Image: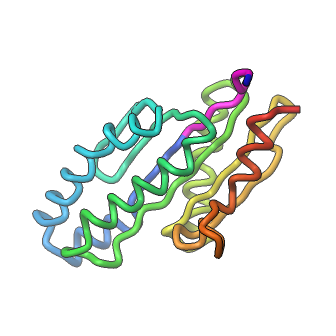
Amino acid sequence: IRPSPFYAMLLMDGDNMGKMMGDYKGESISKALSIFTKNVRKIVQEHNGVTIYAGGDDVLAMLPLTRAIGCALSLSNKYEKCFEKIVPEATISAGLVFSHYHIPLSSVMREAHHILDDVAKDQNGRGSVAVSVLKTSGKYCQWTATWDRLMDENGKMRIDDLVLKVQEGP
């Protein structure tokens, strides 16, 4: 198997954090965020990734294509578990960019912020992951789902076919 010319950039951000800090006890939320942050690096490493930043409700990591969506889901599950006794409705959203290594990193980051903020949070209603594929010719496609809709009725990730297609290349 030859190496893929694509990698994954994962950007995550907790949903409605400002509102939660106002509505609930800030100290309890700070403790939950601290527990989440302490677990991020380990979860990313378990998926063969590298954590670039983890602080509070923010995560930035680079991962291999085939492990990225699983990592994002694991981080989402950990986030919800950290908050389940304090704010049971707490969710985190993700922007995941599958990028060719020739694309400038600034363009990848711009796309990650766009699909996180404008697509996963605003268009899809938070608690979502938005995935974008950037090829040297430009944006190839985009895909979005809520965390609870990632798996099909057979327990298979709905995005697996896209990941394999990108991994294989042209």
Q: Position of residue 88 (x, y in %)?
A: 29, 78
| Range drawn in magenta | 2-9
Of residues 140 and 157, the one drawn nearer to the viewer in this rendering: 157
Q: On the image, which quarter does residue 116 sit in? A: bottom right
How many marks do you count on the picture? 0
**Position of the C terminus by quadrant:** top right
Q: Is residue 71 above or below residue 41?
A: below
- The image shows residue 104 at horizontal and vertical percentages of 67, 24
Question: In this view of the protein, which residue sits in the foreground, 30 or 151?
Answer: 151
What residue is rendered at 52% in x and 67% in y? 147
123 w.r.t. 136: above or below? below
On screen, residue 145 versus residue 148, left or right, reads right
The residue at the point 24 percent across, 63 percent down is 82
Residue 73 can be seen in this image: yes
- The image shows residue 110 at horizontal and vertical percentages of 62, 40
- Residue 106 sits inside the magenta stretch: no
Which quadrant of the figure has residue 101?
top right
Give the residue drawn at x 23%, y 78%. Answer: 23
Which of the image's four quarters has the N terminus? top right
Q: Quadrant of residue 151?
A: bottom right
State the scheme by which the image is colored.
rainbow
Q: Residue at x 28, y 72 (%)?
A: 20
Residue 2 lies, with reference to residue 93, above or below; the image says: above
Decide if residue 123 is in sight here.
Answer: no
Image check: 69 left or right of 152? left
